[in-house]
Image (cartoon, rainbow, N blue to C red):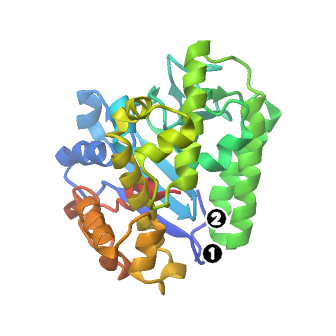
Amino acid sequence: MTHQTNPKSALLERSRFSLGELPRAKQFEIWKESINCIYSVEMDRKTREAGFVANLNSWRHRDLLMIEAQSCSQSFSRTSQMIAADGMDHYNIQLYTDGGVKSEIGIGGDVLQPGGLLLLDLSQRTEAQTSDGFKSMHLFLPRHLVEDHLTHPDDHNLRFLSERDPLVSILFQQILALNRYINELADHEISVLQKTIVMMLSACLNAADGGTRSTDAMRRDIEKGVMIRRYFRQNLFAAELTADKAANDLGLSRSSLYQLFEKHGGVKNYLREMRLRHALKLLGDPKAGRRSMYDIALDCGYETDTGFIRAFRAKYGVTPGDVRAGHRPHPRHAGDGVDKRYENWLHTLA
């Protein structure tokens, strides 16, 4: 647990999700709807009715997000449909301080032992089961911070890292310490620790035993996907970026590119979602407070501020000006009084 002192960081944000004040009959329904922003969860009826609990203590610092969770036994999954709908491709490092997690499709193991780590790749499907009364920590890192340091960046979804590996044990303690002392760290100190965690994680993954189950053909598809993601990330805010230009630059036929982005609703939809997600983050940054809406629109790949404002409102239900004034897009079921800011943080993590 973190020390409850006033944060030293000027950029640290906190959120606490708790269902304790809600009627028991509604608790699991609200939990399931909220956590569906990243995973689909299921639980047997007896557990739901016998004393369901779910608490999330979260903090965000720039492009680093930690969620400390406590709940009951449940299965969680991330489907192809969810991946296509939200476009998130972060890495999620999980560790458990009580209880654990298992997966029949894990790599390098199937049960997380105390002191070990589990890595999930949000760009790939996930199926796992937690134990009852678990307490866990979930550190989310944007993909671009990690993948360039990995020999095979797409080979580690559901990767179980053993507590017997000294480097894994050190990384486990490093994440615990970061969470414990986050309020006492200055912004530049948090950034240093983030870089350290990225390098240690990369070393653990590059040394991990147990190859992937992918065939050579599948590996070629994975490498192609990495190349395409990098291209769009590097050119995301160019107004002249179109499907035709992307296909030409990538050496692909237009039909091949459309086929690859079919699960994302097409190239145009993918670009719009990524640009608006960046805009939401930018509008909440105090350093960008003096910039005109037109400049922000241009930065996000829009030719006019009118078109930008219209697309932003259609996506988030509020205008960019509303967000700049301090209003945030309301998560689903916001009227229940539960703090769900972590949902927005997940979807705006750069």
Looking at the image, the residue that sits furthest to the bottom is: 290
Residue drawn at 59 percent across, 78 percent down: 10
Are discs 2 and 1 less than 8 Å apart at CB?
yes
Please tell me which residue lies in front, 334 or 116.
Answer: 334
Q: Is residue 107 above or below residue 240?
A: above
- Is disc 2 placed on a helix, strand or loop? helix
Task: Identify the mark at residue 9; answer none if there is no mark.
Answer: 1
Q: Is residue 289 above or below residue 204?
A: below
Residue 259 placed where, x, y %? 38, 29
Q: Is residue 215 above or below residue 199?
A: above
| Quadrant assignment for the N terminus | bottom right
Q: Is residue 330 visible?
A: no
Residue 21 placed where, x, y %? 26, 59
Q: Quadrant location of residue 257?
A: top left
Q: Is residue 293 visible?
A: yes
Discs 2/1, front:
1
